Image (spheres, rainbow, N blue to C red):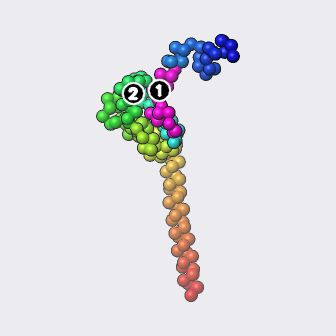
Amino acid sequence: MNADERTRQPSWIPADMKAFTVHVSLCFRYMARELLDWGPVQDLTKCDIFSLGATVLEVCSRRELASEGEEWQELRRGLKRDHPILFLVYTELHDILIALMAESPLHRPSAHDCFAVFSFLKSDLEKELMFQRQYAASLQEKLEHVRGLVKFKRCKSAY
C-alpha cells in the first residue's frame, strides 16, 4: 500500500470534510436517540417515525431544530406538551407530534396507526371511503342476521 492509498478517504466521505461535517450535523437534528447509542435497534421504522415527527415539527414551527446541546437532548427525552416550540405549531398537530417524538420507540405509533388514529390527516375522499366501508359492513351484518332468521323460520315451520 503506497502513501496515497493510506491517506485516501473512504469513498462515502466527500473530499471537502467541512461539507461532510455540516451534512452529518444536519442529520442529527432528525435522528432518534436509539440510532446514536451504537447498540442494536429493535425497529428502524420507529426511528423513521421519530424523524418524521422532527421534520414536521421543524417545518410547522418554521424554526431550525438543534443538532446538539441541551435543546437536542430535551427533544430526545420526548416532546412534552409544555415545550415552548409547540406554541409555534397548530394545536391540531400537538398530539401527533408528541406521539411521533416519544422518547421510547415502544410508545411511538406505526405509520398505519398514525393514519388510523389521526383522521384529520386523511383526505375527504379517504374519509368517505372509510364511512362507506363501515356502512357496507353494517349492512352485511344485518343481512346475515336476516338470513339467519329466515333459515330459523323455515326450520321451525318444517316441524
The stretch in magenta equals 23-41
Please report the residue visible at 32 percent of the width from the left and 29 percent of the height from the top: 84
**Could you tell which of marks 2 and 1 lies nearer the N-terminus?**
1
Q: Nearer the viewer, residue 1 or 52?
A: 1
Indicate left or right for 130 with 62 as reference: right
Placement of 31 over or under 153, stated as above or below? above
Q: Could you say whether the residue bearing mark 1 is in a helix, strand or loop?
A: helix
**Image coordinates for residue 21, horizontal then vertical, percent:** 51, 18
Residue contact between numbered discs 2 and 1, judged by CB atoms under 8 Å: yes
The residue identified by callout 2 is: 72
| Residue 39 belongs to magenta span | yes
Please report the residue visible at 52 percent of the width from the left and 74 percent of the height from the top: 149
**Image coordinates for residue 117, horizontal then vertical, percent:** 44, 46
Q: Which mark is residue 28?
A: 1
Q: Nearer the viewer, residue 65 or 88?
A: 65
Residue 123 in sight: no
Question: How dense is the environment of label 1, judged by Cα within 10 Å: few (below 14), some, or many (20 and up)?
Answer: some
| Residue 125 belongs to magenta span | no
Q: Nearer the viewer, residue 5 or 110?
A: 5
